[in-house]
Image: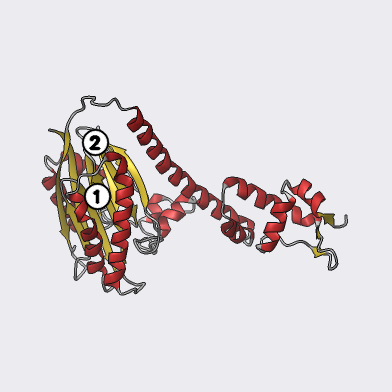
Amino acid sequence: MGLLTIGAFARASRLSPKALRLYDELDLLRPARVDPDTGYRYYAPDQLEQARLVAWLRRLGMPLARIREVCALRPAEAAREIRAYWSRVEAETAVRRDLAAFLVEELLREPGKDTDMLELRYSAHSHPGRVRPANQDTAYAGARLLAVADGYGPAGAPASSAAVAALRFLDTDELPAGDVLNVLEEAVRAATEAVRDVSDGADENGTTLTALLWTGSRLALVHIGDCRAYLLRDGGLFRITHDHTMVQSLIDEGRLTPEEATAHPQRALLLKALTTGTPDLGLHEARPGDRYLLCSDGLPTVVPDARVRTLLAGARTPAEAVHGLVTEANAAGGPDNVSCVVADVVTV
């Protein structure tokens, strides 16, 4: 079978001629031959498989730059990349779904409708652990802001401290509930710049950040890195953040089990931090009796979630909870700095 005209190839691949011309320009799908006089493009039949793959990936919404990378891989590697991409799409879709539900509820809320007055009771505790010479974590708990940051590199401690300090104005300002995500996003941009300032632009310095901002009935979440946020509700413990780490990406792709991840040599390797990626944002409806935990990775590295749930559920107060969790991490060897923030949602 000879070469196909661009029109025939478009019909066979279900790509439009316009798309084929664009993919040629982007070096994504080059024609087998271009007529030197007319500039007309011709394609070989064996290019149909790649063309159909491009069409399918575009239907998934994958960016063209990412498609180029996937098409250059062997089939097994390409499959892993597609699986990882879709895992991220699902996570981002879940965040947008929560935001849509929040907006619908806000628009349908009856003006003046009586609701329970809620507030937070909170405590924070940070410890260097039993191995590290210094504490690069920063933990903060206030009436409206809860935050944990885990710095890394020679300037890790100033980086985590700068990130949390840049958010502390949120603990006093009154913010309309509908604006909370926009305000939090702007505050995180300021925190990113503050970290860059104290790090002098050095790539080896940085920090993770996980924070919750209280609106009076909801908690707005910002998260990047491997600190975690958990919710204890009705006796069940739920992790409400997703680690941005190499091992978590391997778990998402099905290449590693959670149990194997605990002993993986690259379990501390970050894929995103405050100055190197886009944070996750989300909204969580609060209920009386909820207990929230924010912690640096020094806790889950050595204390299983089942034990975390037991300690959280058994503590009478947030102060008792944070000290119990930190003590447990140190009793398990304390190989890293460990910081915990616990907040209870209570009816006033």
Query: Viewer-nearest of labels 2 and 1?
Result: 2
Residue drawn 31% across the image and 27% down it? 109
Task: Decide: is 274 above or below 346.
Answer: below
Q: CA distance from mark 2 to mark 1?
A: 18 Å
Q: Which of the two residues, 209 or 130, is positioned nearer the viewer here?
A: 209
- Amino acid at dot 2: Ser
The residue type indicated by label 1 comes to Leu
* Coordinates of residue 69 in the picture (x, y in percent): 59, 61
Q: Quadrant of the C terminus?
A: top left
For numbered disc 1, what is the local secondary structure?
A: strand
Using the image as rendered, state which of residue 32 and residue 324 is in the foreground: 32
Tags 2 and 1 touching, CB below 8 Å: no
Label at residue 294? 1
Quarter where residue 217 is shown: top left
| Relative depth, front residue between 47 and 162 | 162
Label 1 neighbour load within 10 Å: few <14, some 14-19, many 20+: many
Question: Which residue is tagged 2?
Answer: 217
Q: Quadrant of residue 132?
A: bottom left
